[in-house]
Image (cartoon, helix red, strand yellow):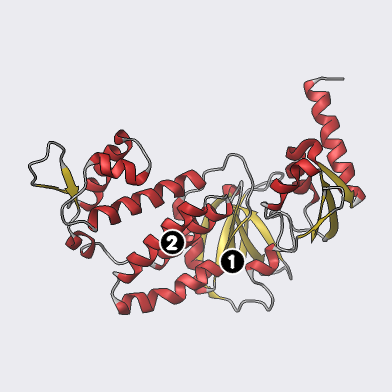
């Protein structure tokens, strides 16, 4: 995820560099400014030429060619949609959450400049939808590969979330046959897998739905009134990751050698760190999702010890024992 959005940030930055020059820039200048190789700049220029169509060579006596984008090229670009503006803001958040703050800042700056070029009336119409999308989309940061979900499905769900409109899901669970459900969508949560946070019309609570198990999503002609307290931050903060269950008081101890690294992690919105006299670090937070906690903290190896709850200690021990049985060892 971070790599994809880092490339987006670089592409937008290159467009702004080419637009903000009268005399043009050489490949070497662009490579130095971007911190990449000439071949990378050449590929990016080819992509910009294909999309924008206005890339031009500046006449010069120098041996190296100079390139620029006329400012009028950007003025011909269609205004940002609410979905595009929200996606840029979300991309910056993802980059920042994964420790790439410099690239996140570049993307935020590019987004601000593109918004500034928008027609004032179009921007005024788009801003409420952008804010609604940002409130309805969240992150569950987990390392590892991601699953593919069709972009059209994401677009359909976003439209239903903004319009407070019920949708009919064709959903195939891990066990059981394909079924249809009428749900009220509240938000999207991105992590190792993307999820929809939605409530069935016949259930009092919200649930998470894996998007890779959604075969189809059909918007319905039925609006719904959001239930009190059903916001993405409040619902997602009850869990570690996405699985929602009764919360536990979690207490972990990181070794002194891992304490500095642990402080840079956002494990949970309710987390509290407590430095210890012996150099170790105590982490406390309240959340459900013991399985996801076990899978994550297993990656820390001996650098972390579970103090509470006992159930989390047991799951980590069982996970370790299962790995030893499968892969051998003393």
Q: Tell me the number on the disc at residue 108.
A: 2
Residue ID for mark 1: 185
Q: Visible in this render: residue 220? A: no
Q: Residue at x 41, y 46 (%)?
A: 7
Sequence-wise, the earlier of marks 1 and 2 is: 2
Q: Position of residue 320 (x, y in %)?
A: 83, 33
Distance between the alpha carbons at the discs numbered 1 and 2: 28 Å
Q: Position of residue 216 (x, y in %)?
A: 52, 53
Secondary structure at badge 1 equals strand
In the picture, measured across the screen, residue 33 lies left or right of residue 188, that is: left
Q: Visible in this render: residue 92? A: yes
Q: Is residue 146 depicted above or below 289 in this figure? A: above
Q: In the image shown, does 171 or 9 lie closer to the viewer? A: 9
Residue with the most extreme front position = 277
Residue with the most extreme right position = 310
Q: In the image shown, does 311 or 197 lie closer to the viewer? A: 311
In the picture, measured across the screen, residue 219 lies left or right of residue 30, that is: right
Q: Position of residue 108 (x, y in %)?
A: 43, 61
Q: Position of residue 183 (x, y in %)?
A: 62, 65
Foreground mark, 1 or 2? 2
Q: Is residue 42 depicted above or below 212 in this figure? A: above
In the picture, measured across the screen, residue 46 lies left or right of residue 2, that is: left
Secondary structure at badge 2 equals helix
């Amino acid at each position: 995820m971070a790599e994809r959005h880092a490339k987006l940030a670089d592409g937008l930055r290159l467009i702004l560099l080419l637009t903000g020059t009268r005399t043009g820039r050489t490949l070497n200048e662009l490579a130095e400014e971007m911190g990449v190789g000439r071949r990378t700049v050449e590929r990016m220029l080819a992509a910009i030429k294909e999309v924008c169509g206005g890339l031009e060579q500046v006449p010069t006596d120098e041996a190296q060619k100079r390139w620029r984008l006329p400012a009028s090229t950007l003025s011909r670009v269609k205004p940002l949609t609410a979905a595009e503006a929200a996606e840029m803001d979300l991309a910056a958040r993802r980059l920042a959450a994964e420790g790439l703050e410099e690239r996140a800042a570049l993307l935020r700056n590019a987004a601000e400049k593109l918004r500034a070029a928008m027609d004032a009336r179009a921007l005024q119409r788009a801003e409420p939808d952008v804010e609604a999308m940002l409130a309805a989309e969240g992150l569950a940061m987990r390392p590892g590969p991601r699953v593919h979900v069709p972009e059209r499905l994401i677009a359909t769900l976003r439209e239903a979330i903004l319009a407070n409109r019920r949708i009919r899901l064709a959903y195939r669970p891990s066990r059981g046959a394909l079924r249809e459900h009428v749900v009220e969508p509240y938000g999207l949560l991105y992590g190792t897998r993307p999820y929809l946070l939605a409530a069935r019309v016949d259930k009092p609570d919200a649930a998470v739905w894996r998007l890779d198990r959604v075969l189809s999503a059909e918007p319905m002609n039925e609006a719904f009134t959001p239930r009190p307290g059903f916001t993405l931050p409040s619902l997602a903060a009850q869990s570690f990751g996405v699985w929602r269950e009764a919360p536990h008081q979690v207490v972990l101890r990181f070794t002194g050698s891992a304490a500095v690294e642990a402080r840079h992690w956002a494990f949970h919105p309710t987390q509290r760190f407590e430095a210890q006299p012996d150099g170790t670090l105590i982490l406390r937070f309240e959340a459900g999702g013991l399985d996801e906690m076990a899978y994550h903290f297993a990656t820390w190896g001996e650098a972390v010890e579970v103090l509470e709850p006992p159930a989390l200690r047991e799951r980590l021990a069982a996970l370790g024992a299962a790995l030893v049985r499968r892969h051998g060892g003393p």
